[in-house]
Image (cartoon, coloured by chain):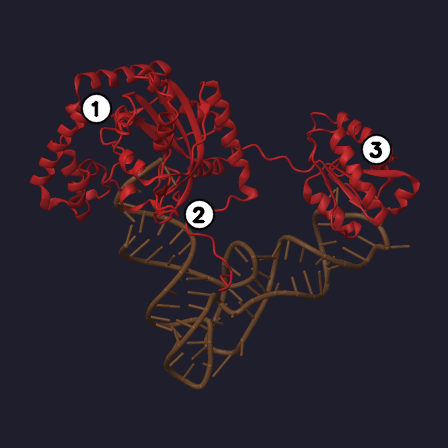
Chain colours: A red, B brown
RNA sequence: GUGGACGUAGCUCAGUGGUAGAGCCCCGGGUUGUGGUCCCGGCCGUCGUGGGUUCGAUCCCCAUCGUCCACCCCA
């Protein structure tokens, strides 16, 4: 299977095959439509940025920056990185293009991200995100609207069984205080922690709260809670967000242990999870990042955004089979003989012109009629057209319906219609018109 | 980075210490030019790679590469 001189794909970088593309297109089309309805504008930013951008935005001591970035030096000696997430680049673009100055922006983008992790279910080294950012809004109204957008999105995709978790991280100062309290608490119980959490204690003690180690649960439940450390303004912001979600009829769970992996978040954070994807259960998550823009040298601007894992949502779409099937061929043109092929090439063009929206497949590469009809059948076409030497000599084309009856038999004269070659496109158009609304795949 | 499972035909998978099989796919025929059902036939493998044990290895052992799942972390 893996012969030594075959070039192997790069680990964790997957091909999206035609059989999977219906789900991708369904997701992308739905997202475009919905983002348009919520007045977001698409933006496109580079896949490559200066390494320092991500270090400053995401945080020097996060796992993403410490060990997951695809970084390299280019020929000019610049330190560059394949983007591990989109927000940093989007914010950088706003600053670079002088788009802030108190202005508000609702923007989004979609594209590949790169993280050097060990692949597993729902996790890849090249993966795609739809990234949505609302810049210049203090919230919590925008927070609520953004969450409403995601809720509507699942609904449109036909996905259920997703759970919304929300939390507030407070301001940077509040979080610092809480972090100190948490560190103190776990330090007094240092010996009870497992190795992972002892390590987390130094880097990101909030992560200990998320531990899957069941023997730590009682220790964790005794830890100080973040909501007790919220500043008054953040607390009010969070309460108002909850009232708004209730007004919208959106069910949520407050999850005081929800902490995001990237350093730039503050106040509102949220995450949608599923139990249908194994260990990688986060399908969409994000939050407020009021301090990030100043941190990157822009003027102080409140902002909120989130990212959705396209592959994970696609997996859910595939599981529920909610994507509408992609169109298959409508007309298959069987042809035999050199002279007939020349005529058939332009007949196919005429058919495409006369029947916009219909898929016309010309049999290419020859083959006997038996093989051509087998291909016609597998193409899904409702109608086969036959142009052989005999038809060419007589100036006619055969129309053969392929799905009219359950027990359709070979060459029964009754099922085959003959029409003049010159008016064939009109005849075919008429044939489909008579059957409008009937997708008869009998 | 750590741990576990698994690599046999294009695909899904059987199999045995004596150098391999089925189904699907593809191609041809039954029907000198008519599909989907049926019948017949054909094509297809360095049994992931390298080494070791053995008279002999696809099978046992070691290494290596790859895939999957989980941890870590995250979308």
Q: Is residue A99 left or right of residue B73?
A: right
The x and y percentages for residue A97 are 39, 25
Q: Residue furthest right?
A: A394
The x and y percentages for residue A413 are 87, 40
| Circle 1 SS class | loop
The x and y percentages for residue A306 are 36, 28
Q: Decide: few, some or many residues near mark 2? Use Cα within 10 Å; few <14, some 14-19, many ≥20.
A: few
Residue A126 quadrant: top left
Q: Disc number at residue A424? A: 3
In 3D space, how far apart are the residues under numbered discs 1 and 2 (Cα atoms)?
37 Å
In 3D space, how far apart are the residues under numbered discs 3 and 1 (Cα atoms)?
70 Å
Q: Disc number at residue A170? A: 1
| Circle 2 SS class | loop
The x and y percentages for residue B2 are 27, 56
Identify the residue at horizontal 16%, vertical 25% (top origin).
A173
Query: Quadrant location of the C terminus of chain A?
Result: top right
Identify the residue at horizontal 24%, vertical 42% (top origin).
A212
Closer to the camera in the image, A13 or A382: A13
Identify the residue at horizontal 13%, vertical 34% (top origin).
A182
Closer to the camera in the image, A69 or A153: A69
Closer to the camera in the image, B74 or A353: A353
Pick whichever of labels 1 and 2 is earlier in the sequence: 2
Which chain's residue wears label 3?
A
Pick whichever of labels 3 and 2 is earlier in the sequence: 2
Which chain's residue wears label 2?
A
Identify the residue at horizontal 52%, vertical 29% (top origin).
A29
Q: Disc number at residue A13? A: 2
**Are labels 3 and 2 assigned to the same chain?**
yes
Which chain's residue wears label 1?
A
Q: Is residue A165 visible?
A: no
């Amino acid at each position: 299977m893996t012969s030594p001189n075959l070039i192997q794909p790069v680990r964790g970088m997957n091909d999206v095959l035609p059989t999977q593309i219906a789900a991708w297109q369904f997701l992308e089309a739905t997202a475009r439509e919905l983002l348009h309805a919520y007045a977001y504008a698409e933006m496109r930013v580079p896949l490559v940025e200066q390494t320092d951008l991500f270090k400053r935005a995401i945080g020097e001591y996060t796992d993403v920056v410490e060990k997951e970035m695809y970084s390299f030096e280019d020929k000019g000696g610049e330190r560059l990185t394949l983007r591990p997430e989109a927000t940093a680049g989007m914010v950088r673009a706003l600053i670079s293009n002088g788009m802030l100055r108190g202005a508000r922006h609702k923007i989004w983008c979609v594209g590949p991200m790169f993280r050097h992790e060990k692949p597993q279910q729902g996790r890849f080294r090249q993966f795609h995100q739809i990234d949505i950012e609302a810049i210049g809004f203090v919230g919590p109204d925008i927070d609520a609207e953004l969450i409403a957008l995601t809720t509507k999105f699942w609904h449109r995709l036909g996905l259920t069984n997703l759970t919304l978790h929300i939390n507030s991280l407070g301001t940077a100062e509040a979080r610092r205080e809480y972090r100190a309290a948490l560190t103190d608490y776990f330090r007094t119980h240092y010996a009870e922690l497992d190795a992972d959490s002892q390590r987390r204690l130094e880097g990101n003690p909030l992560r200990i709260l998320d531990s899957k180690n069941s023997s730590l649960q009682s220790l964790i439940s005794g830890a100080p809670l973040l909501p007790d450390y919220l500043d008054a303004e953040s607390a009010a912001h969070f309460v108002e967000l909850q009232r708004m979600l209730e007004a919208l009829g959106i069910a949520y769970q407050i999850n005081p242990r929800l902490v995001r992996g990237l350093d730039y978040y503050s106040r509102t954070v949220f995450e949608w999870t599923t139990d249908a994807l194994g260990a990688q259960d986060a399908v969409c998550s994000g939050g407020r990042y009021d301090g990030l823009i100043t941190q990157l040298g822009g003027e102080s601007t409140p902002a909120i955004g989130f990212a959705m894992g396209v592959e994970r949502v696609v997996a859910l779409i595939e599981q529920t089979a909610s994507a509408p099937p992609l169109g298959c061929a409508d007309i298959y043109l069987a042809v035999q003989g050199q002279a007939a092929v020349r005529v058939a090439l332009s007949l196919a063009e005429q058919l495409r012109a006369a029947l916009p929206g219909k898929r016309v497949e010309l049999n290419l590469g020859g083959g006997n009629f038996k093989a051509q009809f087998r291909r016609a059948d597998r193409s899904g076409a409702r109608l086969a057209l036959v142009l052989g030497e005999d038809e060419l000599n007589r100036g006619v084309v055969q129309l053969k319906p392929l799905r009219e009856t359950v027990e359709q038999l070979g060459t029964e004269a009754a099922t085959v219609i003959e029409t003049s070659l010159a008016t064939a496109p009109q005849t075919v158009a008429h044939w489909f018109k008579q059957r409008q609304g009937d997708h008869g795949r009998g």
